[in-house]
Image (cartoon, helix red, strand yellow):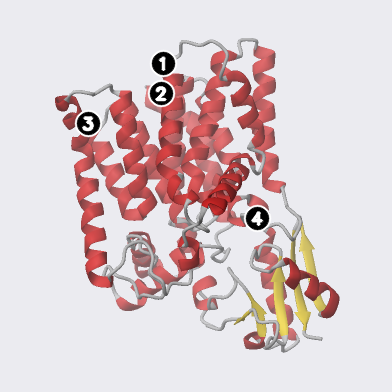
Amino acid sequence: MKWRTDLAKCFPFFVWVILLTVFVRNNFFFWDTVQFSGLHPTHFFENGFSNLILPTEIDSGHPPFFGMYLAGLWKWFGKSLAISHYAMLPFLIGIVWYAYDIGSYYLGRRNAIFFLLLLMVDPVFAGQSILVSPDIALICFFLMAWNSVLENRKWALIIATSFLVLISMRGMMLVVVLFIFDLLFNKRFTIAGAFKTTFPYILSGIISLAFLFYHQQQTGWIGYHAGSSWSTSFDKVGFNGFIRNIGILIWRVVDVGRIVPILIIAYLIFRKSDAVRLKSLIQFLAISIVILTPSLLIHKGLLGSRYLLPIFIVIDLLVLKLIFNKVKDIKWRRLYLVVVIGAMALGNLLVYPRHVAQGWDATLGHLPYYELRRDAIQFMKKENIPFDKTGTTFPNTASTKHIDLSNENWKFANKNFETNEYLFYSNVFNEFTDEELRTLELRWRKIYESKKIGVEVIIYKHP
């Protein structure tokens, strides 16, 4: 049977994501997952599930159901890092299955595994896949919904879009992307056709509006509020800031090895082709860019690589579609595939100089940080260096209760060069200015330093 053949082809990738999850099961929460996987579920775990609205200081405006999901699993199986990582497995397995189905539609069943290969080594996806990340759940339901559109599965589409909007407001935006693509893909331009397309999206629309209305009624705001620690990210930019954001967006798109598939797309896309499915893929990419990027460009700090992950996935598939559709010589085709997959895999090893901010949650390159941080903390305990007199910055400022799920429940002080006796620095922190880095090197004394595969952790003592 066909599904058995498909299952056999997906099986090595199922094994890969399971082994990867087992390998990272004791890794603490990193980057934004401290908020979504530490603070949010801990609140529900300790206070119950009766209130959908999180406390103001940790409410990011998104539906809180991912946090509820983790808290529910903690209630059933125990609160631990391992359970949190294992909670990602259903989504990772779902991503493999739906990516294979989508790859089969665009590339044929024989070539679909190349989409899985490229996806697994894509630095942004790979970086998120080792985290307890709501973006992994979002991508799972995004691929499920996309596949449902391609195969005209209405009830699966209803389920997928409903879960998408329960994860985040970006999930709501993705539903808009899917709806517009659905209209174009099925060429339903009459009133009756548009209604037929709209039906599977009604439930997700109702859920979205209901949550946003309820949140606004309870808190007085939607999306963010002036008192939140991340409110500066939502500051509007002027014309110069908008142009700068365009430059950053371009950098994000070509970063971590993606310049190679982008160049190949630019080279191959103008070759003659009559592939209807290629056209639909280009349409989907264009719709995704038009819907998802404007809000990123007009705000100060929303251009994180993970926000662009759905677009990157479409780019991954597009470059493969162009290679298989337009490169007829088998030797050249194989060379293109090796170059694209190899460049993306090597992108995980890219480390910028410490003066250049990097999206460390969007690459496997941050993996050494977990061991380095643990070793540094053990050194501090051994030397009796007080944590509350040691300054640090995001993502290391939350309590260990929320980063490590530790019962010790202590936290570092916030970075302050005037009051800190010590400073805990790593190049995975982006909030040290160039001037502060120069000050550390010239005036502060290193009392601990450890490096591993491009990642460093240093503890400085005040002069």
Amino acid type shown at disc 1: Val
Amino acid type shown at disc 4: Gln
Do the CB atoms of the residues marked 3 and 2 lie less than 8 Å apart?
A: no
The reply to whether residue 239 is in sight is: yes
Quote the CA–CA distance across marks 3 and 4.
41 Å
Q: Position of residue 172 (x, y in %)?
A: 33, 48
Quarter placement of the N terminus = top left
Tag 4, which secondary structure? loop
Amino acid type shown at disc 2: Ser
Establish if 384 lies above or below 204.
below
**Label 3 vs 2, first from the N-terminus:** 3
Quote the CA–CA distance across marks 3 and 1.
20 Å
Do the CB atoms of the residues marked 4 and 1 lie less than 8 Å apart?
A: no
Establish if 99 lies above or below 388.
above
Q: Is residue 132 left or right of residue 24?
A: left
Image quadrant assignment for residue 346:
top right
**Label 4 vs 1, first from the N-terminus:** 1
Quote the CA–CA distance across marks 4 and 2.
33 Å
Q: Which residue is mark 1?
A: 276
Quote the CA–CA distance across marks 2 and 1.
6 Å
Q: Which residue is mark 2?
A: 280
Do the CB atoms of the residues marked 2 and 1 lie less than 8 Å apart?
A: yes
**Label 3 vs 4, first from the N-terminus:** 3
Tag 1, which secondary structure? helix
- Number of the label disc, if any, that sits on residue 454: none
Q: Residue at x 54, y 65 (%)?
A: 29
Q: Residue at x 49, y 73 (%)?
A: 402
Q: Which residue is mark 4?
A: 358
Q: Residue at the left extreme?
A: 192
- Number of the label disc, if any, that sits on residue 197: 3
